[in-house]
Each structure stands twice: as structure tokens, then as C-alpha cells.
Image (cartoon, rainbow, N blue to C red):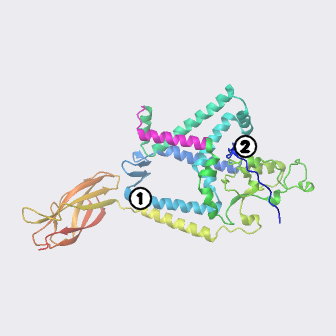
């Protein structure tokens, strides 16, 4: 039986530290097909983010979460509080999309579409432009403070701050009409809550993308912790082909690695230098890997220079690494994909076939009924009409199979403005002794200028028992 080695515990009083700060990562710039895809994704996603609030649709902001009015405008669609279930449905669809694409191709979200990744890419690009590539940044940080260092560091933070403030301003512009917000900012009359969220989101962007970066992925994001539950042996992962690369070692370009007893890996560590989370992909799959493909581009470039085949580091599956066939269409993918298509189809149908009118009938709570001067029995109701159309409508009310119950003002027009809520008192009456006790009734509300907009509402009419 092997004997355990003694372990020395170092305490703070002995000069040790219970916390070791993570070393700063200086990611090296890289070019290649996956870097081009990431650049396209950054331009596309940030373009949508920064431009969407400025787009107009039917003389209003195309995308707006109007919280005071409790409406959400998205292009030509308007979502009301009654459509809250659709938002929940949309979140479920987003969750299944994450399951589907993760099971199929790994952490595509982390590597190409996550806001933390996207803004970190932009901030790192600004940093590289002002401070230089990896080696220059390392030397600059280690150098004493000089005028050049102050200008470079200060200029970087000024640009970071401007970008963060523009990001925070745009974020608030999704919840407040952005043209009015711009006028308020220029006139220094921004409301307290708008200013709070503008500064809060700006600070969060500046801190997360400028300073925390990979630490958000490692320690704050929960996705890395449960992603393995969605992986299987046929999921695309970024992997190092150890059987081809080992044993690793440096050599001349003209040297034959077989004669030297070496694999294809020349141990240049460039794959580590380009990694935004600072991992060594040659150590196997790690939860810190965001599947950005930077190490793939770096290794392919090195292989091209050495004259070796590409693919030492690349997207592959565990089955492919084990020389087994990879199945794309497998039960997990079919189930996730089928459910996703079904939910998207149902969501699209429900959104395009929503009610154009919402009716709520409230009875007078002061009395079940009242006796009018002419002796008739009256019931008073309050009709709340929610016109979900972008144009005004006039409505009329009719009773369906109500017997001797009638409207007190049958020709009354109920006018409701576009996307407005109208409240109207309505009185029903019946002759004395024509109705005993309670009776179920149905009322039909029809738009006069759009007869296809109809709504049936059930209620009750109360009268004396005898």
C-alpha cells in the first residue's frame, strides 16, 4: 500500500495567502474562418441592438417595452398584459432552442451570441488598437507609468466608457421612446429612474466586458455548470487530437517528426495564447471553454506554416475521436427539434390569431338589481372594451336570446380609440315579473366599421324571486 505524502498547510500568519488572484489574460489576436464568423456575429448582433430602438413602424418606435402603458411593441405586433402567457411561451421556446443547439453543436451560444462574449470582443478590439497586440500589452502593464502609458490607458478607458454609456442609453431606449430620451439627455432633464438604469447598465457593461471578462464565464454564468447534461458522444466539441499531436515538442520546419519521435503538436502554445478564457485545450474538454474556435484558427495557421494537415484542434465529437461513426439525427436531437418546431408553429398561430377585442363586464356591486320609476327591473353593468387594433373602432351591443330582457339604450355607440381601453355604463331592464330570480344572458359586441370583429360575453341578470 502506498504511503500518503505529508501535506503542509500554509496560513496567512506564515506569509501565505488564502486567496490567489487570477492572472490577467492577454488574449492574442487571431485570424481565420471562425474568427470571421465571430466578427460577423458581433456586427449583426450589435447592429440589431443599437439600431432597433431607432427604427420606426407605423409612425411609432418599432421595438418598445412601454411599461407605463403596459404594452410591448414589436414591429407590427402589440402585446398586452393579457398576452403575458405568450411571453412565458417565448421563454420556453428559447430554452428548448438552447437545449437543441447545445446538444447538436455544443456551446454556440457562449462562443458567438452571448452578450458577454459580444461586448468583450468589442472591448478587446479597442484595447488591441490602443495598446497593441498581446506582447505589447504585457510590456505596457509591466512598464512604469509614463506619458505614453497614461495616454494609451486613459484613451482606452475613455473609449470603453463612451461605448458603455451608449450601450446603457440604448438599453433604456428599449423601455422609453428613444427620441424623447435623447432630447432629455441633451437638455439634462432625464428622469431619476431613466438615469439610474442608464448608468447602471453602462457600469455593468464597462465592468463585465472591460475587467471581469472570462471571470463572468467561469464563476458567474450557470450555463457552464449544467451544459454537460445536454452533451452526448455525438455533440460537436472543440477537441485536441492527442493521438496525432503527442508527444509534443518543438522542431524545425524541415525536420521529420517521425524521425524525432514527435507528434504534430510543436508545443508553440499559441492555442493557449489566443484563448479568451486562458485554458489549454490540449488538456481535454473544460467547462471554461466557450467554443469560440480561436484555438482552432490558431492551430490551423501553425499547421499551414509547418506544412502539416489541418485539424489537430477542431470541432469534432467524442465518437469521431474514438474512430466511431457520428450520428447527427439521434433521438435527443429529434425530440428537441420536433418540440421546437411544434412550439414555434403553435406560437406563430396564436400570435397571428389573437383576439382583436377584449371585453370585460363588471356588474354593479351596490345592488343585484334596482326598480326603475316605471316599475321595470334594471341591472347596471360596466363594460370595459380593450381595442387591440392600431385604429379606432365604434362598437354596438346586442342581446342574444335574452327573452324580455332588453337594452335601455339599444342604439348606443361605444367609441374606443386605437389601442385604448374604453369604459361604458350599460343598463339592461325587464318588465316586472317577466324574469324571476337570476338568468344567464349573452351579449354580442360588434365593431360597426369591421363586422368581422365580434365578441360574445356571458353574464347574469337578476330580478326578484317573486
Q: Residue at x 28, y 57 (%)?
A: 385
Residue 183 tag number: none
| Outermost residue, front side | 13
Camera-side residue of 227 and 163: 227
Quadrant location, the N terminus: bottom right
Percent of width and height locating residue 426: 19, 59
Examine the rendered structure and indicate whether residue 433 appears above or below residue 219: below
Q: Looking at the picture, how far across and down is residue 49, in whole percent?
A: 52, 46
Of residue 4 and residue 232, the one placed in the foreground of this image is: 4
Q: Is residue 460 left or right of residue 130?
A: left
Q: How many marks?
A: 2
Tag 2 secondary structure = helix
Q: Which residue is mark 2?
A: 14
x and y, in percent, of residue 273 in the image: 74, 46
Residue at the location (50% across, 62% down)?
Answer: 92
Mark 2 vs mark 1, foreground winner is: 2
**Label 1 secondary element:** helix
- Magenta stretch: dominant SS? helix
Residue that label 1 marks? 84
Could you say which is closer to the camera, residue 161 or residue 443? Answer: 161
Res 205 quadrant in image: top right
Instruction: Give the residues in magenta.
Output: 187-210
Considering only order in the chain, which callout, 1 or 2, is on the residue closer to the N terminus?
Answer: 2
Is residue 60 in the magenta section? no
Is residue 167 visible in the rendered structure shown here? no
Amino acid at each position: 500500500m502506498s504511503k500518503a505524502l505529508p501535506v503542509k498547510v500554509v496560513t496567512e500568519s506564515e506569509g501565505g495567502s488564502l486567496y490567489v488572484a487570477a492572472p490577467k489574460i492577454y488574449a492574442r489576436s487571431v485570424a481565420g474562418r471562425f474568427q470571421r464568423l465571430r466578427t460577423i456575429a458581433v456586427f449583426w448582433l450589435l447592429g440589431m441592438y443599437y439600431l432597433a430602438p431607432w427604427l420606426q413602424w407605423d409612425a411609432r418606435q418599432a421595438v418598445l417595452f412601454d411599461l407605463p402603458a403596459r404594452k410591448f411593441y414589436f414591429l407590427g405586433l402589440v402585446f398586452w398584459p393579457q398576452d403575458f402567457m405568450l411571453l412565458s411561451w417565448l421563454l420556453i421556446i428559447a430554452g428548448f432552442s438552447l437545449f437543441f443547439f447545445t446538444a447538436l453543436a455544443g456551446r454556440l451560444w457562449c462562443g458567438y451570441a452571448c452578450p458577454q462574449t459580444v461586448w468583450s470582443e468589442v472591448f478587446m478590439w479597442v484595447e488591441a488598437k490602443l495598446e497593441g497586440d498581446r506582447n505589447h500589452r504585457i510590456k505596457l502593464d509591466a512598464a512604469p507609468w509614463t506619458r505614453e502609458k497614461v495616454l494609451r490607458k486613459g484613451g482606452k478607458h475613455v473609449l470603453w466608457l463612451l461605448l458603455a454609456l451608449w450601450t446603457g442609453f440604448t438599453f433604456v431606449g428599449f423601455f422609453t421612446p428613444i427620441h424623447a430620451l435623447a432630447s432629455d439627455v441633451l437638455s439634462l432633464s432625464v428622469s431619476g429612474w431613466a438615469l439610474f438604469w442608464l448608468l447602471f447598465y453602462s457600469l455593468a457593461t464597462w465592468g463585465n466586458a472591460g475587467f471581469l471578462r472570462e471571470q463572468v464565464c467561469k464563476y458567474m454564468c450557470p450555463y457552464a455548470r449544467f451544459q454537460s447534461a445536454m452533451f452526448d458522444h455525438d455533440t460537436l466539441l472543440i477537441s485536441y487530437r492527442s493521438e496525432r499531436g503527442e508527444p509534443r515538442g518543438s522542431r524545425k520546419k524541415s525536420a521529420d517528426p517521425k524521425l524525432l519521435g514527435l507528434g504534430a503538436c510543436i508545443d508553440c502554445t499559441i492555442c493557449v495564447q489566443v484563448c479568451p478564457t486562458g485554458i489549454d485545450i490540449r488538456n481535454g474538454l473544460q467547462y471554461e471553454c466557450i467554443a469560440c474556435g480561436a484555438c482552432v484558427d490558431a492551430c490551423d495557421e501553425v499547421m499551414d506554416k509547418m506544412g502539416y494537415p489541418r485539424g489537430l484542434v477542431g470541432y469534432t465529437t467524442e465518437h469521431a475521436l474514438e474512430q466511431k461513426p457520428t450520428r447527427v439525427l439521434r433521438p435527443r436531437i429529434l425530440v428537441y427539434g420536433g418540440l421546437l418546431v411544434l412550439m414555434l408553429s403553435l406560437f406563430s398561430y396564436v400570435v397571428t390569431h389573437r383576439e382583436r377585442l377584449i371585453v370585460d363586464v363588471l356588474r354593479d356591486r351596490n345592488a343585484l338589481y334596482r326598480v326603475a320609476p316605471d316599475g321595470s327591473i334594471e341591472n347596471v353593468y360596466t363594460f370595459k372594451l380593450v381595442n387591440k387594433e392600431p385604429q379606432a373602432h365604434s362598437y354596438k351591443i346586442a342581446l342574444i336570446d335574452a327573452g324580455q330582457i332588453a337594452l335601455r339604450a339599444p342604439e348606443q355607440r361605444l367609441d374606443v380609440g386605437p389601442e385604448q381601453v374604453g369604459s361604458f355604463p350599460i343598463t339592461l331592464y325587464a318588465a316586472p315579473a317577466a324574469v324571476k330570480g337570476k338568468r344567464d344572458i349573452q351579449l354580442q359586441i360588434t365593431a360597426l366599421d369591421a363586422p368581422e370583429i365580434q365578441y360574445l360575453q356571458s353574464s347574469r341578470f337578476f330580478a326578484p324571486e317573486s
